[in-house]
Image (spheres, grey):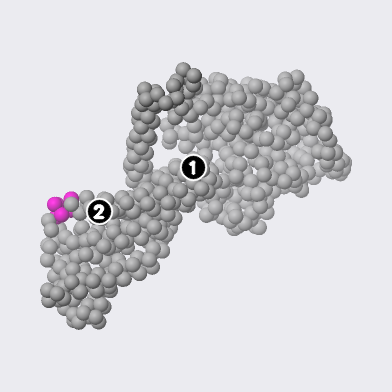
Amino acid sequence: MTDTAAPGIPFANIGSRSRPKHSHTSRLPALTERLADASKQKLRTVQEYFSLAGKSLRFAFVRPFYAQDLVQQMDEIGVKSLGIVLLTGFFTGMVLALQSSVQMRAFGATMYIGRLVSASMIRELGPVLAGLMVAGRVGSGIAAQLGSMRVTEQIDALNTLGTDPIKKLVTPRVLAALIMLPILTIINDFVGIFGGSIISSVLVGVPTGYYWRTVWEQIAGDGFVLRYVPTDFVQGLVKPFVFGGIISITACYFGINTTGGTEGVGQSTTRTVVLSSILILVVDYFLTQILLSVLGS
Amino acid sequence: MMDDVRDPGERANPPAAPPEGPSPAPADDRGADRRQEGRRASERRPTSIRRAIREELAEEPTDEYFSEVHPQEFRAVPVIELDHVYLAFERPILEDVSLEARKGETICLVGESGTGKSTTLKLILRLLVPDRGKVCIHGEDITDLTFEQALEARQNMGMVFQSAALFDSMSVFENVAYPLREHTALDEDEIEERVREKLAFVDLDPDQVMQQLPSQLSGGMRKRVGIARGMANNPEIMLYDEPTSGLDPLSTGTITRLIMKLQRELDVTSVVVSHDIRSVFRMATRVAVLNQRRIVFFGTPEEMASSDDRYIRDFLGGS
């Protein structure tokens, strides 16, 4: 390995005199080489990302189990995110009812606000909003914590103490996110629909009982999976499960691969929030397509 | 055991003294004298540093001392062995590095920054795998181990990091207890007993520090907790990455003395990466000097002090 030219320094052994300064023939291979290196690097990143995901899930079934860490992370990811999720869910439900009432009044369809709010919250807004909120709050926290552990050699210390850092640090966080995000989403859905009911009854004039009946009609109207689970719920719970995985694995990936001291920790945190948010929105579209084709509308 | 523990900065007992029991008064007087000498030595011009080092060597445990303690093992058994190791990432890091540490030895790795000293420790820990060459622990090549086997192999090693690398979300007790909880079947009482013993060994009051968080400790105390955590599992090998960097002279003396004590009382084989040449001469049985990715000197501190090699002489700070 010592004999090979250092990557990223193409033509390192070619004298500058023998190479014309602005020659296209010499710049082209350098450009393609650089592109090839960059794409290899990206592919390696994707491979490492999925490898981390696979390992973290596999370690959930391999001793030792870090149950205490799992509970701690469930508290960190779930319980401590409750406030932000309640707040966003409640106001989203309210604004949804308010906006739709304006449009629906034109058609005399304000009685169907409950259906619209519940369908929107359960199928889309609940999972996506909970995902984005958790990505911002928890994803950044995980990336910063693991990044700090990396730059202060604590992850190396785990390794030297005979502990697999993925098993100890990543698996509990991924499991906790997979468990807690659907729960947070259910709460978010409920609070959103409840917020909608307040606006419907106070500002739009829809009776509360009628509102909740239309909500139930919407939930039950699309049928059930396994006889008892409403189809809407399946859609609404598969998504946060996937989003939980995206957030936790992205955060752990950037966290444990942090380099460059405290500045690197900041970069990891930013990358985690940006990539998680983008992935949530992109994956949401494809998941919706798949779920609609599997479960029907 | 605690009788052997002195105030920070005080020198360790000379090798001939019994390891336990109160030290006789003359030794204390001598310690005071030597502290005076130490001060004088630090005030000297760099050109006379080598003379000061020779004076240190006259009173510190040396090759002969360890050969008496381990008459056969010391001479015969390489506990750690690097055999013609090459390593490169984007550029070469180590080239043809060969090195061995026999049972009970303290090998000090010195050299300029960026010459691959810490990388050598990572190779011994099998956190890195060489491109060529072998790294053997007790004669067994560890370069071919799987990740899980490497984790198991590391349980026999203790590592003290430059930054101590204590888990900042855990208390001192939990930090030291961590390897015990991970790899032993000890119950909580036994773990607490072991943690107290290790903290006392590194000259810390267990009752005072056990419940504190690492952020509440001074740099020297954090390093000592790091040593306690490293030795919690009673490893045969201890590795230190610049254990005295960033410490005041008194704390440096304490850490140096602890490393020597660990070697003397627990028969531990150690590899110490250090820039502190004075500490190196106090604790090393052999010194390896890394320069330009290669080991340019590997020998006893006496040999190093008397070396005519230009680089070694420059490194020691005088002619």
- Local SS, label 1: loop
Q: Which residue position is annotated with label 1? A: A259
For disc 2, the chain is A
Quadrant placement of the C terminus of chain A: bottom left
Quadrant position of residue B42:
top right
Magenta segment's dominant SS is: helix
Q: What's the residue at 20%, 82% (across, down)? A: A205
* Any part of residue A21 in sight: yes
Compared with residue B206, is residue B76 higher up or lower down, i.e. above or below?
A: above
Q: Nearer the viewer, residue A277 or A165?
A: A277
Residue A103 rendering spot, x and y as whole percentages: 18, 72
Question: Is B52 colored magenta in this rendering?
Answer: no
Q: What's the residue at 34%, 44% (across, down)? A: A53
Q: Using the image, tell me which numbered label, if any, was put on residue B110.
A: none
Residue range corresponding to the magenta coloring: A290-295
Q: Residues within 10 Å of mark 1 (few under 14, many from 20)?
A: some
Estimate the spatial distance between the alpha carbons at disc 2 and disc 1, rounded to whole Å.
31 Å
